[in-house]
Amino acid sequence: MSIKVLLDESEIPRQWYNLAADIKLQPPLGPDGKPLTPESLAAVFPMNLIEQEMSTDRWIDIPEEILDILYRWRPSPLRRAVYLERALKTPAKIFYKDESVSPAGSHKPNTAVAQAWYNKQFGTKVLTTETGAGQWGSALSFACSLLGLECKVFMVRISFDQKPFRKVMMETWGGKCYASPSTETEIGSKFLEKYPDTPGSLGIAISEAVEAAVSDKQGTTKYTLGSVLNHVMLHQTIIGLEAKKQLAKLGIKKPDVIIGCVGGGSNFAGISFPFIHDKINGEQIEIIPVEPASCPTITRGLFTYDFGDSAGMTPLLLMYTLGHNFIPEPIHAGGLRYHGMAPLVSQAAREGLVTPRSIHQLECYKAAIQWARTEGGIVAPETSHAIAATIQEALKAKEEGKEKVILMNLSGHGHMDLLGYSRYLAGDLKDYELPQEDIEKAEAELKDLPKPA
């Protein structure tokens, strides 16, 4: 029985898979309601990444210079959770892709390195971004340090306070981290004036990062983000492509169930998109994105055009959304507190290719504790959602008496998230169910925006 399946560096995938070749998306729209042109995005992104964002090519080559950086931790291990299997007494075989082995401790560097490299080729000097739990801000700071770029990170205030060592990680790699909303931007200052005690949101942090980029008169500052957009999903597919090769080494043609936590969509896309391609072509696979019940974007949100940020500075994207004015409850899974869902993930759900699920945070922490006491690792609060769903599916297989193969993405470790564990173990956390009136409020706020065709 193999507990770890490793790939040699020579076996690393040399192309990313682009789901946009196999799922048709309605285009992002400008403020005038008309489809965006590449030129209309040029103030925010470099043209080489805009080309990837709008590409419908199925396979896109990974430059050798990017692979050379990824070799620091890729290919990542595929592990079998045999100790959890024994504890659950399940006939299911549980495999997980271990993305916690990256220098930043999560899957985020897969796209941070790519985006920083493409920006460097374009002549960018400074990158701005937002971050929720700090995973993405840490990853981008790491990537920028290797490629000689400045990095400015606007971190959602509640996470800035809850996870102070994320800021230290960013600063160690040379990044600058600001609690958002901040006084560094006009938008941040306005939000602080109106809501001085706000916990912040990813939508507000995105607005600040975009403003910081577009206000640079020299044009050498660009904005970057760690989730939602097509090119970010693209870069993460190296996870699922590696997993395919690793499962093949065990003689496994395909998993029966694939699970990933989902906030904006990047780690879920990474593990699932290569298999969604197979599902489109006839394979029987259940693919489950798991989100917090307190921020149920894809399970209860509206499928409509919405802004990606709170100030309405971004293009309008067709996605599942809770409304760009949504201020989430300050649960500890900060990376899953975004109001919108990646258009590609949203469309996959719309077409029935994935079956979303929401779980409360107490069940997720309980699952994370069981994982730690069997498999050993302390996972990020975001990842705990995937573990909770994995346990649900493993117990379901037990009830059915079926030897299912379950593949999960372990998107990051929780070594910087111990305050959440401390509060859970002390009994200080509680579940939160998003009221229906919040959904109805979002529907009213979005009624005048364009509707899908």
Image: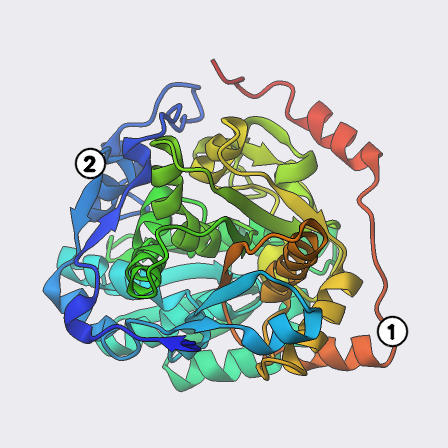
Could you say whether the residue bearing mark 2 is in a helix, strand or loop?
Answer: loop
Residue at 56 percent across and 47 percent down: it is 289
Going by the numbered disc 1, the residue's amino acid type is: Asp
Residue extending farthest to the front is 401
Sequence-wise, which precedes: disc 1 or disc 2? 2
Is 212 placed above or below 357 here? below
Number of other residues with Cα within 10 Å of mark 1, as a class: few under 14, some 14 to 19, many 20 or more: few
Could you say whether the residue bearing mark 1 is in a helix, strand or loop?
Answer: loop
Rendering coords of residue 58 (x, y %): 22, 38
Would you say residue 386 is visible in this rendering? yes
The quadrant in which residue 149 appears is: bottom left
Residue at image mark 1: 428
Residue at 36 percent across and 81 percent down: it is 174
Which sits in the foreground, 333 or 171?
333
Mark 1 or 2, which is nearer the eye? 2
Going by the numbered disc 2, the residue's amino acid type is: Asp
Would you say residue 211 is visible in this rendering? no
Is 28 placed above or below 221 here? above
Which sits in the foreground, 86 or 344?
86
Rendering coords of residue 402 (x, y %): 60, 52
Is 440 placed above or below 184 here? above
Which sits in the foreground, 366 or 167?
366
Query: Marks 1 and 2, how far apart in space?
Result: 49 Å
Is 197 placed above or below 266 here? below
Rendering coords of residue 431 (x, y %): 83, 58
Display colour scheme: rainbow
Residue at image mark 2: 57
Residue at 61 percent across and 39 percent down: it is 298
